[in-house]
Image: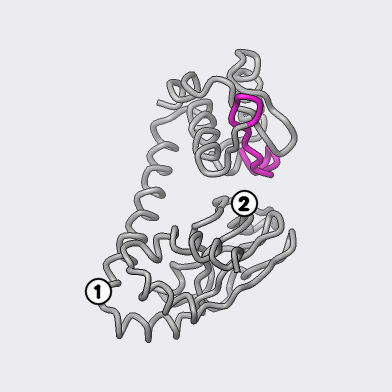
Amino acid sequence: MADAAREEQLLRSSPLFGGMDATSARSLIAQMRRRELAKGDTIFHEGDDGHALYVVVKGKVKLARTARDGRENLLALLGVGDMVGELSVFDPGPRLSRAHAVEETVVFELPKAVLDEWLDDHLEMSRHLLRALAQRIRRQSLSMADLVFSDVPGRVAKAILDLGHRFGRMERGHVTVRHGLTQEELAQLVGASRETVNKALADFASRGWIDVHIGAVEVCEPDRLRARSR
């Protein structure tokens, strides 16, 4: 019971439920399907019909696209409270990316048919979903601006701070970010080559701003990173 209450609380932290009263939220949650995923399990593939959206309540999910030469390109790392696959629900069409679990993960699935019917009876909730979509567009616009106006070390610093804000935990007096990404994936996330990102990470480490580990980074001087990200 405690776990169910905790999961409901985490679900309601999602933009999907922003502004909803408890009764409305529970009526929608009751129509969602809970799915447990092992590390590496796929939620959906590129080209699949966008028949549902998902909300993460445990673990992490990678969104990636496959290039023409077969290489996978990481688009985003999503965590607790994030929605996955919502764009294809509101703009019907094939999925443009693949979503898979980075670790043991729990998501709640909301079919498009259920959401459409529910919104017909709760029209006032549409504005909250519009706000959530607008927030997604805003983040993407900022990311595009960073690619144009920021150098690679600045983008790396900003990515570390963002990952720390979303996934960091205080350990030994510092924020440790167990992101689970390879350096290649981190490079894809900031739109740069692995060699250039490795050079930026090594520079930050030599200055004592961070300590790099496999699949994790310890943030020792967040203010320095914040200044470098601007």
Name the amino acid, label 2: Asn
- Name the outermost residue toward the front: 1
Q: Residue 202 sits in which quadrant?
A: top right
Q: Circle 2 sits on which residue?
A: 73
Q: Kindly give the residue lying farthest to the top in the view shown.
A: 207
Label 1: element kind: helix
Question: Which of the image's four quarters has the N terminus?
Answer: bottom right
Compare marks 1 and 2 and give the one earlier in the sequence: 2
Is 128 a magenta residue?
no
Q: Residue at x 67, y 30 (%)?
A: 195
Foreground residue among 45 and 105: 105
Stretch in magenta: 171-186
Q: Residues within 10 Å of mark 2 (few under 14, many from 20)?
A: some
Q: Position of residue 7 (x, y in %)?
A: 55, 64
Q: Position of residue 147 (x, y in %)?
A: 44, 37
Amino acid type at image mark 1: Glu
Q: In which image quadrant can residue 24 be found?
A: bottom left
Q: Which residue is mark 1?
A: 124
Residue nearest the viewer, comparing 13 with 164: 13
Question: Does residue 207 sit above or below 24 in this rendering?
Answer: above
